Image: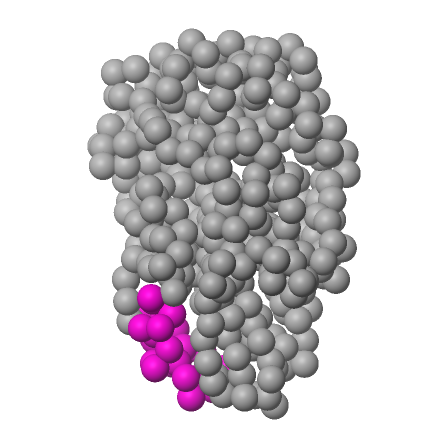
Amino acid sequence: MSARIVRLEGVVYRLPLHGTLAWGKGSSLSVAEHVLVRVYLQDGTVGQAEAPPRPTIYGETPASVLGLLKHLEPAVVGLDIADTTALDAARNGVVNNHTARGALDMALHDARAQAAGGTLFSTLLGPQTRVRPSFILGIASTAEMLAEARRVVEAGVRVLKVKVGRDHAHDLRLIHELRAEYGDTVQLYADSNETLTPELAPAALAAMREAGLSYVEEPLPVRLLRERAELRRAEILPIIGDDSCFTPADLERELDFGTIDILNIKTARNGFTDSLSMLSRARQSGLGVMIGSQASTGLGTLHAALMASQAGVTEPSELSFVLKLQDDLLNGPIEFTDGWLDVAALAGLSVDEAKLKRYRLN
């Protein structure tokens, strides 16, 4: 039996990190200040998801997420949770606001699964119930980055996404040291966050390839569409699309111009609906696929892990940012074993209300 929506809620919370995550030319994150988005149904069901606002990426803030929920609430209250057509139309009645709309979509999926007598895991868990997690290694001193790498490798992760782009010489020294320490037991790839230029990119990618990196994410600014297509045609190093592929429409543009080899899908900005659509399109086009993190905490990681379990996700997925957190909202840990994450084993995890009370800000 289905039920109608009676209320939307946003709860802002802040979790401390181990150190700072730095990326790009000047962006950094020292705490995870996110919004728990909740959808309430008339039968008492509560669906929930995490919105991680990123002002320097999407222009969102915790206040804007709360504002969008208030704006959309009149359009969704009273709708049947099973009426996906009407709910998608309401959610897409605004543009941008990526993490707010993505979290609302995932919370709707959660509420819908519960109203039908199931869970997200019973409805969305794919065939790949064990997946390879990667860790986002932010820009810092070489000593700090090596120390963090050791910590997460000891915790069971075997793939590192190394943020680069501020100092190419420093980047290469770090990569060589990581390769010297771990050999082939740890897979490495780079995220340039659009920091290279068309003139420097070919040599930089060649140096990354020689250093043993698997691929590079967004080496050039997204606006340089022709230059990005030319760089990909050079086949120096496989290129991951992230900032260039915010939406399904963005993905179509990138496919038209042939700019990427691998698609990074982020449930945090696309929700489940658009993520599944983009995954299907990527599979049709022969792209590799990974599932990315927007520095998600535990709940967002559960949802990203469900996407990573889908057929067609071919690359390691960013599912270990929880190792950067000093604490989390979940009632138990997300654990990694010898380079793998058992997605099916996460089904029993949920938001701990006592922890939410401790860390909430509104």
**Range shown magenta:** 67-92
Whether residue 61 is visible here, answered yes or no, is: yes
- What percent of the width, then of the height, locates residue 154? 74, 28
Q: Position of residue 215 (x, y in %)?
A: 49, 27
Q: Is residue 307 above or below residue 27?
A: below
* Vertical position of residue 266 compared to residue 122: above or below: above
Point out residue 294 in the picture as x, y percentages from the top left corner.
Answer: 47, 46
Is residue 133 visible from the viewing direction of this image? no
Q: Which image quadrant for residue 124?
A: bottom right
Residue 20 x/y as whole percent: 50, 32
Magenta-span inclusion, residue 73: yes
Residue drawn at the location 38% of the way across and 65% of the way down: 66
Q: Residue at left 72%, top 58%? A: 331
Is residue 112 rendered to the left or right of residue 333?
A: left
Which residue is at the front of the view, 298 or 180?
298
258 on left or right of 356:
left
The image quarter containing residue 195 is top left
**Quick one: quadrant of the N terminus?**
bottom right
User: Taken as a whole, is the magenta stretch helix, strand or loop?
Assistant: helix
Apparent side of residue 5 relative to residue 301 in the rendered image (left or right): left
